[in-house]
Image (spheres, helix red, strand yellow):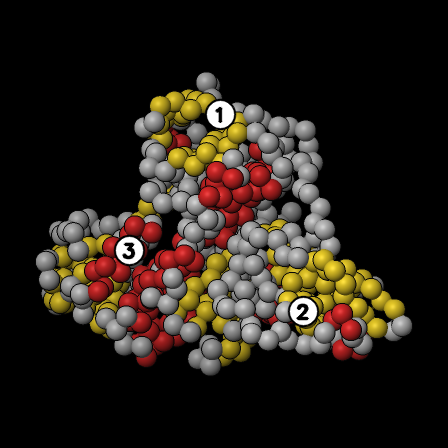
Amino acid sequence: MAEEQAQPSGPDLTQGVDPGAFKDGKLVGHVGEREILLVREGSEIFAIDAHCSHYHGPLADGLVVDGTVRCPWHHACFDLRTGEATRAPAFNALDVWEVEQRDGRIFVRGKRERPASKIAKPDHPEKIVIVGGGAAGFAAAEMLRRQDYKGEIVMLSSDDAPPVDRPNLSKDYLAGSAPEDWLPLRPDDFYQQAGIDLRLGTTVNAIDPDKRQLTTTGGTVGYDRLLLATGAEPLRLPIPGANLPHVHTLRTLKDCRAIIEAAKSASRVVVIGASFIGLEVAASLRARDIEVHVVAPELRPMERILGAEMGDFVRALHEEHGVIFHLEDTVAAIGEQKVTLGSGETLDADFVVFGVGVKPRLELAEKAGLKIDRGVLVNEFLETSAPGIYAAGDIARWPDSHSGDNIRVEHWVVAQRQGQVAARNMLGHREKFDAVPFFWSQHYDVPINYAGHASKWDDIEVDGSVADRDCLLRYRHEGRVLAVSSIYRDIDHLKAEVAMERAVTS
């Protein structure tokens, strides 16, 4: 979340610009202190705020697609006519501006008034309940109000804090380079002002689909529509010492605060697992000048997701920053100050962090009799086997039109987008969830973007150089590109994502 630039870029758009000044259909200028992006699409010219409302990404470096502009960093999407944030991870709309063409020049005038959202269908349930206070649950509640839904919204969250920007917990906030006030997805007073009954510290014990009723620690709650967004919980390996006080997992703000507190007096940490979370934790703790050892059973980190060459690059990148790997090894036991490996080696450790993955929270859905297959089975509209009950986020297994398989993924942006689609469908829309899965990971100054879903591949085509941090990788299976990953190839990555969207299976 970069600071606004002190001086706006480009020409004063109120004074007019020459149409020949556009580059690749875009031009950045300003109106007063506001940076504005002009976009030419076909015969139309649009004016919109120049920076993404998520992390302030430069939309001039993004991609224009069918009346929208997509952010190059985390693939948020904005409607050029209305400024609406049509795809997470951005939620806040951007301002759009009046454009006038005369005397061979283009002028930007005042802001356009943003049209109010309207529900496209008359289905208007009186009460919608959301179980979960994470990415999917928040995105659903926010979208319901954005759709001008006037009914009752109850959000039941087992967390003790309102919804936060979870990716930041393993990145800038853990590294100490982001203040805590960056973390809330909305200010605390948002929920009351929006009429969202957010009940923190609330556990849901049972669902009765016939009565359309939940049993919670606070009593019973009825519903007309229900969204299950219970998310996932981090795993702890079943080894001696796994539950000692100095052994941590990272999922919630409370978890992150505990790790930060442990880091204040620590000099050495052992991270168990070379997952994205595990290695982001490693990078963040190196930023705090803590000696970091990573223990994992695989030959190279993240090879299963990114392939061998990218896995070798990630390892080398972390080693450049002082991380010490113990690969093809396991942790046999955790003691008060030491970790014993399966190889017999012992490592000093002031504290330990598990980064070995998560498991979806399926117990509630299972007890309710919903169909389960390594996740809660949903149709293309994210509805479960029980009418009126939807599922989104880490627990949902949906029919993916791109791979042709039923898949379940644990990506933040996917959960948010599923929450948004589920919200619209609970209001009577019949909108298929067909977004290409997307996530990003940050390792020191190197961002890795990934779009698609490739559980296996026949070959990986590398465009550019992984070692030079300038590459786009295509993961192919039976001749089809199922996924792409990239480093500093933002526009190429966006184009590849659009190509996947347009090449869906029949």
Disc 3 and disc 1: Cα gap in Å?
Answer: 35 Å
In the rendered image, which residue does mark 2 sit on?
32
> Which residue, as the protein is rendered here, is positioned at the far top?
211
At 84% from the left and 73% from the top, the residue drawn is 105
Type of amino acid under label 1? Tyr
At 74% from the left and 60% from the top, the residue drawn is 110
At 63% from the left and 69% from the top, the residue drawn is 33
In the rendered image, which residue does mark 1 sit on?
223
Circle 3: element type: helix
Report the front residue among 465 and 44: 44
> Which residue, as the protein is rendered here, is positioned at the far bottom?
468
Q: Would residue 236 be seen by someone viewing this image from the given angle?
A: yes
In the rendered image, which residue does mark 3 sit on?
257
Going by the image, does 87 lie left or right of 37?
A: left
Above or below, 195 against 350 in this view is above
> Which residue, as the protein is rendered here, is positioned at the far front?
32
- Say which label, 3 or 2, has the lower sequence index: 2
Mark 2, residues whose alpha carbon is within 10 Å: few (<14), some, or many (≥20)?
few
- Say which label, 2 or 1, has the lower sequence index: 2
Q: How many marks?
A: 3
- Say which label, 3 or 1, has the lower sequence index: 1
